[in-house]
Amino acid sequence: MYGFEMMTFNIKDGFLEAIVRGHRSGLLTVADYNNLSQCETLDDIKMNLTSTDYGAYLANEASPIYTANIVEKCTLKLVNDWNYMRSQADETLATFMDYCTYGHMIDNVVLIVTGTLHERDVQELLDKCHPLGMFDSIATLAVAQNMRELYRLVLVDTPLAPYFSENLTHEDLDEMNIEIMRNTLYKAYLDDFASFCQKLGGTTAEIMGDMLAFETDRRALNITLNSIGTELTREDRKKLYSNFGLLYPHGHNELAIAEDFDQIRSAMEKVPAYSGIFSKLGYGESQMLDKLLYEEEVKKCVDCFEQQFHYGVFYAYMKLREQEIRNVMWISECVAQDQKGRISDGIVYLF
Amino acid sequence: MTDLTHPVVWFYIPCAITWICFLISVGSPDRFIDYDWLWLLFRNMSPYFWSALGVALAVGMSILGAAWGIFITGSSLVGAAIRVPRITSKNLISVIFCEAVAIYGVIVAIILQTKIEPVSPGPNGVTYDKWAMASGYSIFGSGVTCGFANLVCGMCVGIVGSSCALSDAQNNSLFVKILVVEIFGSALGLFGVIIGIIMSGGVKWTA
């Protein structure tokens, strides 16, 4: 029953919810970002970050420090926090937290396969993988020649196995097929995650339903934007859209036939939730779209913390931390390349 | 938790209740529920059963409520205090409010228990007279009132206490404001205690 989960939620998950709310209070605020924007060098950034939650991770870094180091340490903090919570999580929170990381797993798989295609070293690729999405046999992905082998050799033992269906082809992996594979896996993953959340019921189902609907609509929008002018047919494009979300099913029909940005815009504006985003864009302009979508995602994640006794806070914390890492990376890059005027273009304030 | 719109609730349970009433009414051709037969049933149950059950429920349910509230508050408090240790001392007040609920239950149980007097049954050796029956039922009602009021009060204070701990960790001006909500919540248990004491105030086991 909706609302009565308050009585039993804390039995298994009260401690971890309190921990994740503690982490949320350590996210960087506008004042922190202003301090970081005033920095002249990357060492200044490191000094400013040591007074925040990242202190323990960055304090012992040797100078000279590079953007990659900063980002790596910040990601390490996210991974450590996440693993601390995941190792203490009971069912069903443990399954939920695993679902949150499958997206990274898919991205890692695609990264390694693409890298292998371009003949890069496996070790180098493994270093670039996102740590939250690692699994044991990931290095053997480099051996596979086509999708069947990929599935049979490696992925059948991973949690991604159910997302491979019979329609994935025997063709050799090339750029286009890899992107299609990524999007097909992501579609199956989001459908699965959404139905899992609905089964959990209560506040979790409501909040996660909303956030996953936004995620899937955002992916549909990006797929459409990226496939304009490529050889992806309309039917194939339609197959990559998920089976839920605000755009399902009528918006998907319209997006599938869209051929330029204005048609996409008219399809998205029919959904009231997204017309606000598109009204901020001028006609024909699509560069700001990414930033507006990130802002919308951050707003949803921050609102998620308003309610207590649900699992959405874990997912939202992961997304907010990742946005913060992106912000820190942007600021570091701007400072390193002496382009401080562009800092405010690229960061999304969380609070 | 079950879904209240499920057919079980709205069809099968009424059917079951109707069937039970029918069974009870068999033996009385002119009435749907056979009150005489039911009274026979209740008349043969000793008032001491009811009074003992009342005392047990008073203390048992109150302590269940207090324990429920304490674990709800405690788990959030422990988690939040890892990062913000200053909240621990103030937020123990929430735990104390829950504990008070248990104490109410114990007090009422002791009071109810002192009101039970030994009385012998009537001439047939099984049924008691009306004074004893009324006393037994009063003590039962008093115990149930107090017990269930404290049960929900404990849960309420616990849930609010959990939110209080988490809010205090973020912003310490919120503590006193949410404490006011908790104080109102803990008044619910007091209502149960007062009514329980009033209900059991007039028991007399003999004429």
Image (cartoon, rainbow, N blue to C red):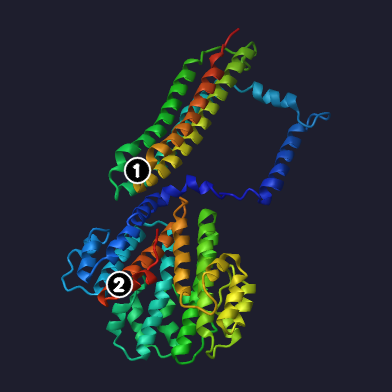
Q: Is residue A2 above or below residue B39?
A: below
Relative to the observer, which residue lies in front, A348 or A159? Answer: A348
Task: State the count of labels.
Answer: 2
Mark 2, chain letter?
Answer: A
Helix, strand or loop for disc 1? loop
Q: Is residue A128 above or below residue A98?
A: below
Helix, strand or loop for disc 2? helix
The answer to whether residue A316 is left or right of residue A332 is right
Query: Is residue B56 in view from this perspective?
Result: no
Identify the disc placed on residue A177.
Answer: none
Q: Amino acid at mark 2?
A: Lys
Label 1 close to label 2 by CB (< 8 Å):
no
Q: Position of residue A161 (x, y in %)?
A: 46, 76
The answer to whether residue A183 is left or right of residue B46 is left
Query: Is residue A5 in view from this perspective?
Result: yes
Relative to the observer, which residue lies in front, B177 or A261? Answer: A261
Relative to the observer, which residue lies in front, A58 or B141? Answer: A58
Q: State the residue at coordinates (54%, 18%).
A: B198
Q: Residues within 10 Å of mark 1 (few under 14, many from 20)?
A: some
Mark 1, chain letter?
Answer: B
Q: Which residue is mark 2?
A: A340
Q: Amino acid at mark 1?
A: Asn
Q: Position of residue B139 (x, y in %)?
A: 55, 21
Task: Tell me how far mark 1 sits from mark 2, CA to CA.
Answer: 36 Å
Q: Which residue is mark 1?
A: B172
Q: State the residue at coordinates (58%, 78%).
A: A264
Quarter of the image for residue A178 reads bottom left
Q: Position of residue A174 (x, y in %)?
A: 44, 91
